[in-house]
Image (cartoon, rainbow, N blue to C red):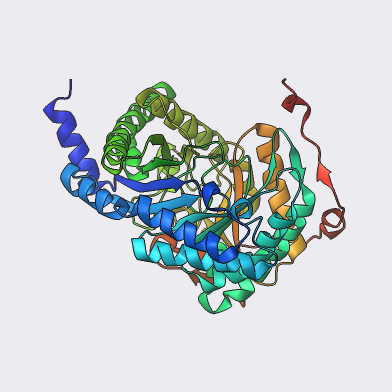
Amino acid sequence: MINISEVLETNRWILAENLDVRTITMGVSLLDCASSDLTETCKKIEEKLLRLAKDLVKTGDDIGREFGVPVINKRLSVTPIAIVGSACCKKPRDFVKIAKTLDKVASKLKVNFIGGYSAIVSKGMTKADELLIRSIPEALAVTSRICSSVNVGSTKTGIDMDAIRLMGEIVKETAKKTASQDSLGCAKLVVLCNAPDDNPFMAGAFHGVSEADAVINVGVSGPGVVNHVLKEIRGESFEVLCETIKRTAFKITRIGQLVAQEAAKRLGVPFGIIDLSLAPTPAIGDSVADILREIGLEHPGAPGTTAALALLNDQVKKGGVMASSYVGGLSGAFIPVSEDQGMIDAVNAGALTIEKLEAMTCVCSVGLDMIAIPGDTTASTISGIIADEAAIGMVNQKTTAVRIIPVVGKKEGDSVEFGGLLGHAPVMGVSRFSCEKMISRSGRIPAPIHSFKN
């Protein structure tokens, strides 16, 4: 039974601790929009998205108002466009035309972002995959709401190093194409390993081919809430610490479940998954770094950081799976730099480096996220960073990602302002030692031995 104290507690979380439904994301299959004619394909895409998602933003706003829980973002994700455009796109600019169509639809629907300008190249690239990848810099430069992702590896298939080499070049080119915006295009481009089919969080969201024609996925976040409840048990044992995080995650997920089911019912679209991820924002108090400090670290990056993050991630997942039968996506703790003021403070204090962040990604939800690096970083170094993260994901059977921003004209120690949810970031240093000879090798890294379970 729900008692009045729990109602008051939830109300306090919403009003004072930044509890929100971070996103309602409608995933839509565009497989039935594919044709050999580019103009027809774009027309079908526009018609289908406008038909299915015409009430998405209104529904999210109505639910937030009626339930008293802020629904911050309303988004779309679609079938990887490399698949949808494979029959009609013969050159990169053909894919850019689809990107412009998606951007136009997103603007008409007033959704924040649309994800799925993507390619899945875990084992190799088709011609269409390569064309889409080469179109990414231009597509992100001429659109405002498109998010792009490329999955370059998996535990089952290994890592496509040809794709990783190409992605280093693409990240650099995207930075140049959007240099007038502090290389903002790179903030909407993520390179993944073991990408899930049902992720509602950008920039990695796409609608997997294993999904239904349309689904509603909801992402819930509450790092401020977790930090608040941990302050109330300061100094207690690890057992009390873990139980408190787990119970809090359970309550947060139940709120998301309620919103997701209501949104699915009103939109006439099946409910997909709840993604409970502690995704920070630049708002003061809405920080994963603050949770790590409350656990007992002076700054993230101090000895014990990886252990504290592992504990946090595990308890969040345990609480989430008890609250909903359909927890999916990424679910856990995000550790972006630019979107988390506590992480920014740790970098500025000298406590947190890219190397330590990489170690932390072994136990958290995603990977190296929203990290600004010097604009003169080489493409091969970026490829090496992507390869390292992909290896962590492949070996540990988890999703890892790299969303890194080589800011044109900036050097280590400078800062860059992205604005809004993307926040601001210090420019972090990277290793000055080269991996170019390794990255220049062709082929792929084989799957690890523990992947063979059939």
Of residues 160 and 250, the one drawn nearer to the viewer in this rendering: 160
Q: Quadrant of residue 19?
A: top left
Q: Position of residue 284 (x, y in %)?
A: 34, 55
Q: Can residue 47 be seen?
A: yes
In the rendered image, the vertical position of residue 24 relative to residue 377, given as above or below: above
Q: Quadrant of the C terminus?
A: top right
Number of marks in picture: 0
Q: Position of residue 302 (x, y in %)?
A: 55, 44
Q: Quadrant of residue 437?
A: bottom right
Q: Residue at 59% x, 68% y: name it.
A: 96
In the rendered image, the vertical position of residue 293 relative to residue 156, given as above or below: below
Q: Residue at 74% x, 59% y: name it.
A: 166
Q: Can residue 410 be seen?
A: no
In the rendered image, the vertical position of residue 435 relative to residue 124, given as above or below: below
Q: Position of residue 381 (x, y in %)?
A: 74, 60
Q: Is residue 397 left or right of residue 10?
A: right
Q: Quadrant of the N terminus?
A: top left
Q: Is residue 1 left or right of residue 177?
A: left
Q: Position of residue 74 (x, y in %)?
A: 35, 53
Q: Quadrant of residue 54?
A: bottom left
In the rendered image, the vertical position of residue 441 relative to residue 208, given as above or below: below
Q: Is residue 264 left or right of residue 287?
A: left
